[in-house]
Amino acid sequence: MVERPDILLEFDAVDYSYPLSEMPAIQNLSLQLTAGQKTALIGQNGCGKSTLFLLADGLCRANRGVIKSRGLPLRHDRVALNQWRQRVGLVFQDPEQQLVAPTVAADVSYGLCNLELPEAEIAQRVEQVLHQFGLSELAMRPLHQLSLGQKKRVSLAGVMALRPELLLLDEPTAYLDPIQTRQFLAALTQIEAEGTTLLIATHDLDFVYRWADWLLVMDQGRLLLEGTPEQVFSRPDLLELGLGLPLLKQIWDSLPADLRQGQSPPRTLEQLRLAIRP
Ligand SMILES: Nc1ncnc2c1ncn2[C@@H]1O[C@H](COP(=O)(O)OP(=O)(O)O)[C@@H](O)[C@H]1O
Ligand SMILES: [Mg+2]
């Protein structure tokens, strides 16, 4: 039975400790991700963001608690996991951890082959995602010849070939230069436009402020707080975490009160310009 068709991912009181580790990496974590909501996950290094993603994709197994998508619990047998990963896709921070096959096309088809789809369907989907992510010309290229930005796009294409409804991205722009970052974000915009819901773990608070509808803040394996970016970045306890604040928010808060009065805080430069135009 589907209890909450709009909840694409739910954690209910999840605990997880890595083998041989004394400190739990995730503690009593409960959260819900709603379809269509752009959610960002922030928190210091080591707070448990990547572990949350590994649990959500079934790569780690919770010691306690339940993980669900659309009301259906995650199960760890091979068939159930393959089905789960068609719904919930994960792009690792480091593409080297994700890429498995010798060439671009082979890598992008890897997940599809696991699903035992007809060959013609696999070929058609591979061609489509290679085209979508600007990789068609690199199809036969060995992965080790690619730039990091290209490798990131290959790992994204491999996950999107499965057409997940929820895409988890672990620090997607880490290690990328500004041009690669722009290309990657453009690819994400396209994915969103096609109806995939995104959860992005990132340290880029300026991006979070402009992009996210909802923010999850983790600390030491727990969910510390959640809310809209405006709510979260106005919370004094966030400052204690030392994550900093988005530049736009700092600029806005430093403007004279009468200029800001009656206006909602701008989330983009363009909105700031309009807000302060005499
Ligand atoms: N493979 C592992 N074995 C043992 N402990 C780990 C492993 N990976 C991460 N941890 C620990 O789990 C905690 C959460 O780490 P992680 O999920 O990587 O945080 P984040 O992604 O927010 O930086 C940290 O204390 C980290 O040291
Ligand atoms: Mg991490």
Image (tube, grey):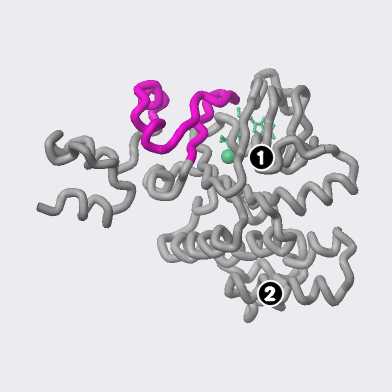
- Residue 179 vs residue 169, the one in the foreground: 169
Report the number of discs: 2
Please state which of residues 185 and 230 is positioned toward the viewer in this rendering: 230
Q: Position of residue 152 (x, y in %)?
A: 59, 60
Left or right relative to 118: residue 246: left
Of residues 37 and 80, the one nearer the viewer is 37
Residue at left offset 63%, top offset 60%: 156
Instruction: Find the magenta span and give its range.
Output: 214-242
Where the N terminus falls, by quadrant?
Answer: top right
Q: Look at mark 1 in the image and give the residue it sits on.
A: 7
Front in this rendered view, residue 84 or 93: 84
The percent position of residue 263, horizontal first and vertical second, equals 24, 41
Measuring 89% from the left and 46% from the top, which residue is drawn there?
Answer: 78
| Residue designated by label 2 | 128
Instruction: Tell me which residue sits at (39%, 31%) in the image.
Output: 231
What amino acid does circle 1 point to?
Ile
Determine the secondary structure under disc 1.
Answer: strand
Asked if residue 187 is among those painted magenta in the image, a careful observer would answer: no
Residue 135, x across and y down, in percent: 62, 74
Give the class, few, some or many, for how many residues have Cα within 10 Å of label 2's Cα (few <14, many ≥20). some
Q: Secondary structure at mark 2?
A: helix
User: Disc 2 residue type?
Assistant: Gln
Q: Position of residue 55 (x, y in %)?
A: 72, 36
